[in-house]
Amino acid sequence: MAQSQSSEAKTGYMLVAPPLLYAVLLLAAPLATVLIYSVLTGENGAVSLPMTTENFTTVWTGRVYQAIMARSLYVSMLVTLTTVLLAYPIAYFVSFHVRPERKALWLFLITIPFWTSYIIRVALWRTILGYNGIIDSTLIGLGVTSEPLNILSYGVVSIIITLAHAYAPFAVLPIFVSLEKVDRALLEAGQDLGESRWTTFLRVTLPLSMPGVIAAVLIVFIPTVGDYVTPELIGGGKVPMIANMIEIEMLKKRDQAMGSAIAVTAMSIVAIVSILFVLLNKRFIGGTK
């Protein structure tokens, strides 16, 4: 019996070892390196002792870093709000109004944007929103305006539009899964009791789908805070976000310690926000049982 248990344990360890090694080498080790670098002294492209908290003090008190961090959170929150508000009606339509045998096709169509590179999609939005782009040409052709609007010049607006499009499928899928779990009998019961469809939606469907909404919020919020490509290509570097600042510190100023401190600060803020949403999600799940 003991030999059998020992053999099963060895088999289990052998199965777990490859993914564990992968996680340690590609996730834990780089994260630990960034954490260590953030408390070292950076100079001439290298880090050295003594250990110091001056990097974090500069990040938290420097007005430039505060402004860029606030802008990153502001843009990410607006992108998340816009994406979820656009994704929910789509997920609702597919879940409640599309025949079951066609739902897979609709979900397949929703994922079509993933067939192309993220950079290509961002570049296409630059063509659409840029000076004398598709929007400008259309508006001038219709006589709505006499000169190009160049939406890209608005910076934050163009970044929000691009990111909302890029992450929309990520928001649709978890909301759809959550809506699929809603018991239709509860909706029929609400309408039998005289409630309107809108009231039934607010009191039954929306609360039961909130776990999917919160999951969508996390899926969109976390990567958009640290997005680098969109601010660089769409904003033209004129509206830098936190990832762009890390790139400047790491590669241009060659201050590995300061760049690491900014990265750790951003990760800490995102982690706190994520934990709050996870706790909120548990509350909704507990309240619907």
Image (cartoon, rainbow, N blue to C red):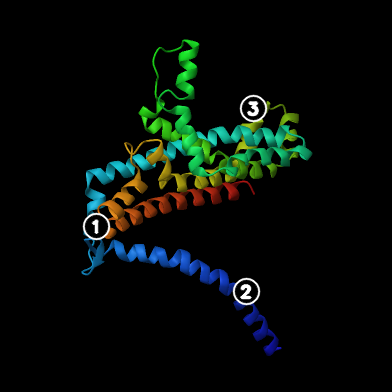
How far across and down, in percent of the image, does residue 283 sit?
A: 54, 49
Marks 1 and 2, how far apart at CA = 41 Å
Residue placed farthest to the right in the image?
Answer: 101
N-term-proximal mark, 1 vs 2: 2
Q: Is residue 56 left or right of residue 169?
A: left
**Label 1 Cα crowd, 10 Å radius (few <14 / some 14-19 / many 20+):** many
Q: Is residue 204 left or right of residue 25?
A: right
- The tag on residue 198 is 3
How far across and down, in percent of the image, does residue 267 sit?
A: 39, 54
Label 1 sits on residue: 55
| Identity, as a three-letter code, of the amino acid under mark 3 | Trp
What residue is at 23 percent from the left and 55 percent from the top? 57
What residue is at 49 percent from the left and 34 percent from the top? 124
Quarter of the image for the N terminus: give it. Answer: bottom right
From where the camera sits, is residue 212 visible? yes
Q: Quadrant of residue 170?
A: top right
